[in-house]
Every structure is written in C-alpha cells, then in structure tokens.
Image: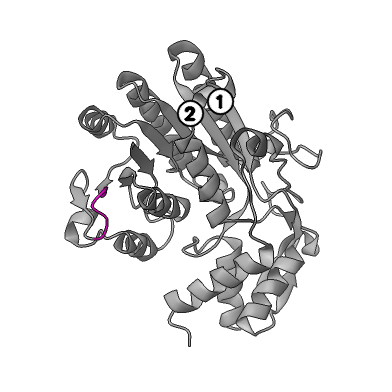
Amino acid sequence: MKILVTGAAGFIGYHLSTLLLSRGHQVVGLDNINDYYDVNLKYARLNDLGVAGEGVSEFGIENKSTIHSDFRFVRINLEDRNRINHLFEIEKFDIVCNLAAQAGVRYSIENPHAYVDSNIVGYVNLLEACRATKVKHLVYASSSSVYGLNSKIPFSTKDTVDTPISLYAASKKSNELMAHTYSHLFGLATTGLRFFTVYGPWGRPDMAAYLFAEGIRNNKPIKVFNHGNMERDFTYVGDIVEGVMRIIEASVEKRKGNLYKVYNIGNNNSVKLIDYIASIEKNLGKKAEKIMMDMQPGDVAKTWADVTELIKDYDYQPNTSMEEGVEKFINWYKIYNNIV
C-alpha cells in the first residue's frame, strides 16, 4: 500500500515509517520540521531513514531515500492547503496516518495559536484532502489528555471526555469530533488513537525520560511533580507502532461497518513516576537529585489505558516492560549523546 505518514521526522512517525518500510509498504513522509525542539534530532531521524542533504530543509521538494527505495520525504506545513492538496492529487494515497501535531500540554498554555494552526486548521486540510482523493482510511493521533478531569481509572473510550484541561487536549478532542463528522457525511473510515505517555529511543528532548536522563547525567536536579505522587501508563514506542501498523494493515470491515472508531493505545498498566526515575537512575549508574514540586497546570495525577477494545479488534499486545523499555532508551541516549 502507499501510505502517507505525517510527522515522519517526529518520534513516533520515524518509528512507524521504519516499521512500515520493513513490511514492504510505500511510504511518503511529511513533516514541517519546526523548531519546537532541537531540529538536529529531527534531521538525524530522517538521516537514519536515508534522507539527508540540503533538499530536506526546502519546502515542497521531494527527497528520495538512499537506503529505502520505497521511502520519500517532503517538507510541508499542514496549514499549507495548496501544497497538501497537490500532494494528495499526485500521490493518490491508500492510507493516511496523521502523527503531525503541535505537541506538549504545557506549551499549549504559552502558545495557543500554534495548536490551532497545526492541530485544527492543518487537520481539516487533511480531512478534506482525504475526502477529495478517496483515501481508504485515515488513522490519526489523539491523546490520553482528552480524559482531562476524568477520575475513573483505568480510562476507557466509553468514558465522557468533555472536561479537557489544556488547549492541546481540546485540540485533540476536536480532531475526534471532526473525524466523526467526515465518517458520517462522506463515508471516510477514521481511526483515532489516544496515545498514553510514549517513550523510547529517538524520543523528544521535552519528554520525561529525556529530561530526567539529561538532569541525572549532568548532575542537575530534576523536578518531580505532585511530590512524587504521579502515575503514568508508560508505553514503549515499539509497542505503539506495532499497534498502529496492525490497524493500517487490517481491513476496516472487521469493525462490522463501523467507519468511525477511537481506541486507547497504551501499556494497560500504570507505573509510579518514582519507579520510572529509579529505572533511569539504574541504567545511567547515577542517582538523581530530586526537587519535589506541586502539580503543574494542565496536568493530571494518574493515567491508565484500558486497551480491551484494541486487543479485541486488532490483537494488540503491548509486551515491553517498563524496565526493558527504559534500558533500550538509555542505550540509545548514550549512543546519540556520545556517552562512553
């Protein structure tokens, strides 16, 4: 199949593109390579996919991989409707997987317009392009943050999600609502995936694992919010992209004609933040100096994904333990940062 992966220079997009290529699919990667975090990490991911050189930084230019004959990359903003429409008209994608978004809960408090531009305007452009070119299936990233003030644990897709506590969460909920509209009006098959605290090699510098590793390595204190009473459904990136790949490769018919669907995708387990930090300490061979902090605005104390539906429909099997996943992350972190 020919598959568009937006956010291909991003953390999950890079891993998904790699997996899809290993499965024999044609992949067109799209990213705007913005400077929300160090662009050198984004370029390094693309280089690992065989795309490098001056052309990568130019908007609208197709770049062919020197490693994967079935991978091409193009730099485009999702808000650029004309370029998006032109790309869809030329390529005639079978499947679109939208992983491009302005990420980060706390950054949405500081810079709301970036979220409206990418997560709402850009998302509508993708929906329209999918409709116009008769894309078979749109798979898109939602987020566990849509559960907001929900106090019921574990989080279920049957729970009401009407209380988002950040603009990021609100933008992701709006994606689900718009997908429902396009499935209903135009028969576009859509699948939303509520990601739960993804981590692993090539992870973003603003994510907890990277921030903790940096602090511990450089003998700087790390901030532990809610005085250590935080729990997260930490999910290894390899398990995440395996689940996404299963959805992409499977026929929507197995959902008994249900064109619109939303799933949780996580590890089906909640881990204490203190234990997560301890595992990072163990793999770095250093103890962290911890500063206990109050809860941050827009944050929640505990997340835990009920992935029953994803297991039932797609035989999703998250099987990477937190200890194993952290070890893989730290091994990559040491190599990437030239730590002996």
Whether residue 177 is visible to the viewer of this picture, yes or no, is no
Residue at image mark 1? 254
Judging from the image, the colouring scheme is one colour
User: Which image quadrant for residue 305?
Assistant: top right
Q: Quadrant of residue 219?
A: bottom right
**x and y percentages locating residue 234 in the rendered image:** 66, 56
Residue range corresponding to the magenta coloring: 67-72
Secondary element under disc 2, as helix, strand or loop, is loop
Left or right: residue 188 compared with residue 155 = left
* Badge 1: residue crowd in 10 Å (few <14, some 14–19, many ≥20): few
Residue 103 on image: x %, y %: 50, 48
Instruction: Please say if the residues under marks 2 and 1 sit with CB atoms less than 8 Å apart.
Output: yes
Kind of residue indicated by mark 1: Lys
Regarding residue 55, the answer to whether it shows in the image is yes
Q: Is residue 70 magenta?
A: yes
Residue type, mark 2 in image: Ser
Near-viewer residue (292 or 258): 258
In 3D space, how far apart are the residues under numbered discs 2 and 1 (Cα atoms)? 6 Å
Residue 37, numbered label: none
Residue drawn at the location 20% of the way across and 52% of the way down: 64
Q: Dot 2, how many residues are within 10 Å of its Cα: few (below 14), some (14-19), or many (20+)?
A: few
Q: Residue furthest bottom?
A: 340
Q: Which residue is mark 2?
A: 251
Image coords of residue 17 (percent x, y): 39, 50
- Residue shown at 64%/47% (left/top)? 266
Residue 293 in the magenta stretch? The answer is no
Number of marks in the rendered image: 2
> Is 297 on the left or on the right of 183, as rendered?
right
- Horizontally, residue 16 falls left or right of residue 144, namely left
* Magenta span: chief secondary structure: loop
Looking at the image, residue 173 sits to the left or right of residue 224; the answer is left
Element type at mark 1: helix
